[in-house]
Amino acid sequence: MPRKGVLVSALAVLAVAVTVGATAAVAAITSTSGAVVQIAPPASVAENALQSDTQIRAFDEQQCVTLTSPLQLDFSAVGGSGLIPAGTSVSSHLLHFDPTGGSSVTLSGSMSTDGTIIGAITTDAGLDASDSLGAPGTVYPTGTFGRGLDPVVQGDTVTVSADLLTATTTVTDRFHFDQIRVITHCVPPPPVAGFCRESVNPHGQNTPPAGSTTLPGPRGGQNEDGFYLIGSDDGSPVTVETGGVTFGPFPSGSVVKYTQAPGSTPESKKIGSTNGQAGAVAAHITGPDELVVVSSDGTRTTCFLPPKPK
């Protein structure tokens, strides 16, 4: 006789439609403990396809997808109704336990992520309705009876830590299987830091004198000679802005000369020759205010200029 009686929620069935709006951002599993073991997305998590009497498998599903309709949770870690509104960017992770069926097995373990946990989906209906968040290429048991937790008869539980970064579960099973879909906030990618450092003169012979220009000097980050090495920490090209005008892109590691001339029209021109070290300077840029380096993700870094002569 089947062991699970799952109340089908019409709201859970109707509410979950998503589209994949994948970005460079992620919210990944960072560690596991107890019986929970992280794996790569498997070929199938259908019943009897991935069995173990000693392990609860955990893997990342789709990351940073934008909900096109509300997503109903069965358990909310943050309180409220557990209804995540459309337009929210979420990531999904699955816990999967499927014993061989020889005898009843109880396992406990935890999974931690780098994205804060919003809640979990633990019912047949909720899991079926949210399988669109599943890992590409993995077969899911959509519509299969008994995939959700049974807190009443078997005492299955899922809890979330106070810092909202760890989900812990205890599951018991024999004839069926248990799945938990943990939903987390999307973690934005770290900003691409730009840099603007004092650099060589037009002949490539020396870096402007240290002391007043070299950090942590009293005018650290300023360069009386106006030559700057510009770029980004990930090696991607950058642009520069002054007076509301953008120049570039320049390869990361380029050297530019900048002249601040109040009231001037921003312009960029070649400097020196293309021979030898003189060609080390990519452009001579003139503008009315400070020069700003803009990274590929829009992060802005200002090239600090020396004070105007008195």
Image: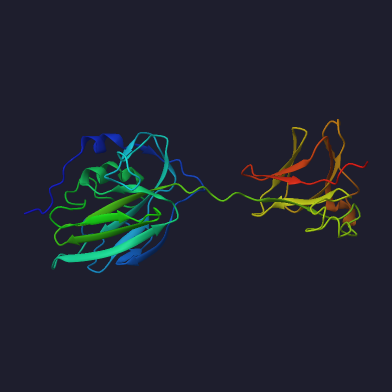
Relative horizontal placement of residue 70, taking residue 269 as reference (left or right): left
Relative horizontal placement of residue 213, taking residue 145 as reference (left or right): right
Q: Is residue 46 visible?
A: no
Return the x and y of residue 91 as percentages of the image width and height: 40, 47
Q: In which quadrant of the rendered view does residue 64 lie?
A: top left
Quarter the C terminus occupies: top right
Quarter the N terminus occupies: bottom left
Classify 224 as above or below 172. Answer: above
Q: Is residue 164 visible?
A: yes
Classify 54 as above or below 89. Answer: below
Relative horizontal placement of residue 61, taking residue 296 as reference (left or right): left
Classify 297 as above or below 233. Answer: above
Which residue: 35% across, 45% down? Answer: 78
Please name whichever residue, 166 or 42, is drawn nearer the observer in this view of the structure. 166
Return the x and y of residue 99 as percentages of the image width and height: 20, 64
Q: In which quadrant of the rendered view does residue 131 lie?
A: top left
